[in-house]
């Protein structure tokens, strides 16, 4: 009896060590990231967007123009290194016919226009949001962030951080495959 | 003596300089919002202390100078000056950023362990402590048997006699 008691601290230690190791492994895979704040919008109607058009003077970018389509909202800024990284993949998606609405967040207007001129423009339209008006509406807290909005105007997916093929396959691709045969 | 005094003045000057730096940087992040109504001002201060900055997560938006925090302060100001009450503004933020945006999380099913957990651990620890303390005298009694005790006494007396 007293012999087996001596092992209790050791067992407790091993259990805790195992638990910490397990959580650490998960964290290395990008889970339990304190920066990943779960979005409140999945399954809810998308907030409407009405922003000045970055590239066309006196024009406005409105989310109502996208009703009935599956589309992406991509929040970016030239100040954000991950957005530079992601840009090439957005170009690829746009060539595949994925409609992406850009939200240029807290950016310098001229820098943003230059960026799109030099690196290409993957967006159907770009709304300019220097004061976070639309960003706050969407619960954005960093860039890049990408939302997927379905034909009924419901937010279905969100990804914080640069888009890459793996995330695309896991989260986004299915919405576009399902859409194609019906069209 | 004079040397020491001089050192103290140098230290004083440094402390003063440091104070000035801290003071001015603290001033720099206070944006000027004017309120016609002192109640609204109090609500604004209250809210900015309770809302979390989502960029630098261990600061509230009153303390943070992150750009998003500045914009959230402005948004809060706009809503307060429009006459919206605390519940409305909190609901606005929580529907967009979730419970996480509140510095003290609400009490609900997901946060149950967060609130109850420390109490449970404390109760468990006290219970264990009581158990250990209660057990102690009985183990002390059995440390030496009567026979052993007498032998020990004998031995101790022997050394004293020498």
Image: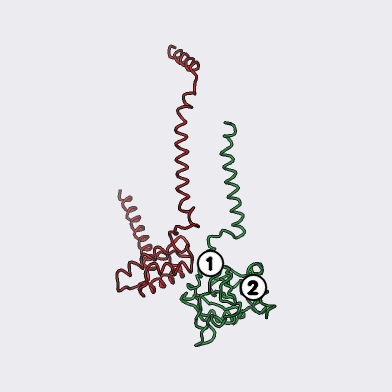
Q: Which residue is mark 2?
A: A175
**Toward the viewer: B82 or B112?**
B112
Label 2 marks a residue whose chain is A
Classify A49 as above or below B91: below
Residue depicted at 34% across the width and 53% down the height: B7
Rendered green, the chain in question is: A
Q: Where is residue A3? Give x, y as percent.
A: 59, 31
* Left or right, B27 with reference to A91: left
Mark 2 or 1: in front is: 2
- Give the red chain's letter: B
Q: Quadrant of residue A31?
A: bottom right
Residue depicted at 48% across the width and 50% down the height: B117
- Label 1 marks a residue whose chain is A
**Disc 2/disc 1 C-alpha distance (Å):** 19 Å
Which circle's residue, 2 or 1, is located before the other in the chain?
1
Mark 2: give few (<14), some (14-19) or many (20+) Cα within 10 Å.
Answer: some
Could you tell me which secondary element the residue under label 1 belongs to? Answer: loop
- Does label 1 lie on the same chain as label 2? yes
Q: Residue A5's spot in the image, x, y percent?
A: 57, 34
State which quarter of the image contains the C terminus of chain A.
bottom right
Please determine whether, in this image, residue B123 is positioned above or below residue B65: above
Identify the mark at residue A106; answer none if there is no mark. none
Which residue is disc 1 drawn over?
A39
């Amino acid at each position: 009896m007293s012999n087996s008691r001596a092992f209790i601290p050791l067992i407790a230690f091993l259990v805790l060590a195992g638990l910490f190791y397990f959580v650490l492994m998960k964290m290395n895979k990008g889970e339990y990231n304190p920066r990943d704040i779960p979005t409140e919008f999945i399954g809810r109607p998308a907030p409407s967007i009405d922003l000045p058009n970055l590239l066309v003077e006196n024009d406005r970018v409105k989310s109502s123009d996208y009703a009935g389509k599956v589309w992406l909202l991509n929040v970016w800024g030239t100040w954000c290194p991950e957005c530079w990284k992601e840009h090439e993949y957005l170009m690829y998606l746009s060539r595949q016919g994925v409609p992406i609405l850009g939200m240029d967040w807290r950016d310098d207007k001229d820098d943003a226009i230059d960026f799109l001129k030099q690196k290409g423009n993957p967006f159907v339209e770009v709304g300019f949001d220097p004061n976070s008006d639309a960003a706050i509406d969407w619960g954005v807290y960093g860039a890049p962030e990408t939302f997927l909005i379905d034909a009924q105007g419901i937010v279905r997916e969100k990804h914080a951080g640069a888009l890459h093929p793996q995330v695309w396959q896991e989260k986004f691709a299915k919405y576009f495959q399902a859409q194609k045969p019906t069209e | 003596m004079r040397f020491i005094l001089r050192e103290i003045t140098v230290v004083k000057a440094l402390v003063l300089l440091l104070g000035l730096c801290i003071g001015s940087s603290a001033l720099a992040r206070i944006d000027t919002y004017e309120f016609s109504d002192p109640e609204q001002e109090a609500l604004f201060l209250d809210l900015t202390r309770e809302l979390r900055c989502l960029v630098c997560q261990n600061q509230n938006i009153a303390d943070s100078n992150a750009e998003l925090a500045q914009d959230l302060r402005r948004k809060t100001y706009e809503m307060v000056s429009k006459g919206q009450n605390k519940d409305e503004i909190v609901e606005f933020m929580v529907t967009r950023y979730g419970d996480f945006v509140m510095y003290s999380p609400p009490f609900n099913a997901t946060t149950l362990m967060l609130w109850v957990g420390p109490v449970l651990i404390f109760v468990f620890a006290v219970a264990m402590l009581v158990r250990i303390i209660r057990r102690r005298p009985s183990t002390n009694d059995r440390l030496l048997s009567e026979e052993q005790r007498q032998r020990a006494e004998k031995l101790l007396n022997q050394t004293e006699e020498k």
